[in-house]
Image (cartoon, helix red, strand yellow):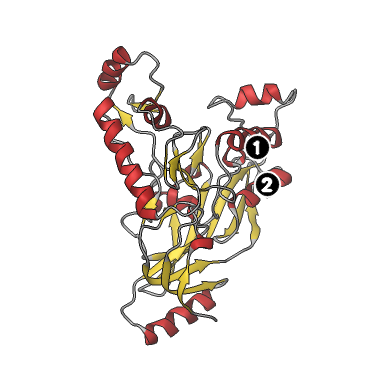
Amino acid sequence: MQIHENLSLRQYNTFGIDVKAKLFADFTSVSQLQEILQYVHHLSPRIPRMVLGGGSNILFTQDVQALVLKNGITGIELVKEDEQYVYVKVGAGVNWHSFVLHCVQQGWAGVENLSLIPGNAGASPMQNIGAYGVEIKDVFEELEAWHLTDKTIVTFSAADCAFGYRESVFKRKYKDQFVILTVTYRLRKNPIFQTSYGAINEELEKMGVKELSIAAISQAVINIRSSKLPDPKQIGNAGSFFKNPSISKEQYDQLKNEFASLVAYTNADGTMKLAAGWLIEQCGWKGYRKGDAGCHAKQALVLVNYGTATGKEIYELSEEILQSVKAKFGVDLEREVNIR
């Protein structure tokens, strides 16, 4: 066990923001986590605790006056199966894209549309990650989490997680109260292909795919994401910074009359989901740069750190974008990225 003081978190967040953690420790098991917590409690009983996964959905705007716990629990285990499904338990510290590729290789279907999403498996239910018509709630079975106060392992079902659009109980109600240890996914033996969302069909055609497979869909998604989204190893970013907002059909009709090329999709409840990237682009932000903080040239939904931008500078840019979209369209954007 090693506890670091005033450690830079630059290498632990995909924005590459250089802030310091008051205390930092990584763990690879529940027993190691308990040992760290017990030791730090004696050292500094009142210090807050924060769990860090892949650091791909967070923007640090200041030093973290807390014990930062880096989750490194690994392992992929087939725990049971039936005629239709396999149930696969994954350590929260497993890289998400590596897990997706493993599933594709094994012929386990359901997460291929979620290829190349940055971060670790433990964050997938926390954020209810989604892309190309698929969300984690569609394949989620259960998760195990350590309650930091009660010091017990709690099992959460899908209902317990209260999944919403990029939402779960872990983002608000139980924020910083639990450490997700493992997540169990329910994956299909016989795939149901999802290709209607985005440019998947177009990419499959470009690839010359004659027979649809989960491997082909995964590769198509990888190709699309690689062409539009910057690699965090080259340009600091956290993927989509804003959620796609939903508005009433009445408001949509009014906007459509004024902006003929408005991009939107119909939600199950009849409301309309707008493409946040389109709204931001129409306000002139795509490719904008001020110092090292900017809006990506290929995808307006992605804010980037070109080198030494501070979290505050990126946050201030996001605030300007929110205000301009509100002024032009009367639509409130919401950040998808967690702000600390």
Say which element carries label 1. helix
- Going from the N terminus, do you reach mark 2 or mark 1 first? 2
Instruction: State yes or no: discs 2 and 1 in contact (Cβ < 8 Å).
Output: yes
Q: Is residue 70 above or below residue 309?
A: below
Q: Camera-side residue: 101 or 26?
A: 26
- The reply, left or right, for residue 252 in relation to residue 128 is left
Residue at the farthest bottom position: 42
Q: CA distance from mark 2 to mark 1?
A: 8 Å
Q: Position of residue 31 (x, y in %)?
A: 53, 78
Q: Position of residue 223 (x, y in %)?
A: 65, 34
Residue at the farthest front position: 291
Q: Position of residue 173 (x, y in %)?
A: 31, 56
Residue pointed to by mark 2: 101
Q: Residues within 10 Å of mark 1 (few under 14, many from 20)?
A: many
- The reply, left or right, for residue 270 in relation to residue 180 is left
Say which element carries label 2. helix
Q: Residue at x 45, y 46 (%)?
A: 128
Which kind of residue does numbered mark 1 sit on? Ser
Question: Which numbered circle lies on residue 218?
Answer: 1
Q: Residue at x 65, y 51 (%)?
A: 98
- The reply, left or right, for residue 236 in relation to residue 116 is left
Quadrant for the C terminus, please: bottom left
Q: Residue at x 67, y 41 (%)?
A: 189
Q: From this viewpoint, is residue 168 visible?
A: no
Q: Is residue 177 above or below residue 189?
A: below
The image quadrant that residue 164 belongs to is top left
Q: Camera-side residue: 78 or 236?
A: 236
Which kind of residue does numbered mark 2 sit on? Leu
